[in-house]
Amino acid sequence: AGNLKFEEDLSEERINTDTCHQRRERVYNGSRMHFFRVLWTEELDASLFRIRTENSIYLTNEEVLKIDKHHNKFFNYPGRLIVEYGGSRSLIEFVDAPVYFEESGFFNPGIKWSGRMALQRVADWLPYEYQPN
């Protein structure tokens, strides 16, 4: 657990900004950051993300999102969930629920991931200030 600090590599010989933006966009779509941002805006139904139980019951924002009196948001469900995005699937197991998350896509540890979202590693991380085109 910890935080990362990103700094732009500004050396012209090492960076092609168009290529960099395309790669970031590709990494972002369907990522954990993308998922938590959609959950934050409560636009799950309008997105490509779908959350379902292992029994194939699709869930809504209201069934997985908890908001406390300070307007903090938490992701929670009493069981394992499957997150679908554009043909890929990820399994979520809550290890320490509820899981606090922020508008930026930051979330506290407390989820064990498997599937596509579990394949994302350090090379796939994005700064929290990243915004897709």
Image (cartoon, rainbow, N blue to C red):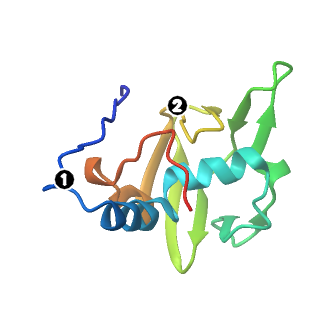
- Who is closer to the viewer here, 110 or 6? 6
Q: Earlier in the sequence, mark 1 or mark 2?
A: 1
Q: Work out how far the residue at label 1 is from the one at label 2, CA to CA, in angstroms.
A: 36 Å
Name the spot of residue 33 as percent of width and height, x first. 53, 49
Residue named by callout 1 = 12
Q: Does the CB distance between marks 1 and 2 fall below 8 Å? A: no
Q: Residues within 10 Å of mark 1 (few under 14, many from 20)?
A: few
Q: Residues within 10 Å of mark 2 (few under 14, many from 20)?
A: some
Residue named by callout 2 = 108
Residue at the image position 53 percent from the left and 36 percent from the top: 106
Name the spot of residue 30 as percent of width and height, x first. 52, 64
- Who is closer to the viewer here, 104 or 31? 104
Q: Residue furthest left?
A: 13
* 45 to the left or right of 118: right
Residue at the image position 40 percent from the left and 61 percent from the top: 21
**Tag count:** 2
Q: Secondary structure at mark 2?
A: loop
Tell me the quadrant of the picture where the N terminus can be found.
Answer: top left
The amino acid type of the residue labelled 2 equals: Asn
- Who is closer to the viewer here, 128 or 40? 128
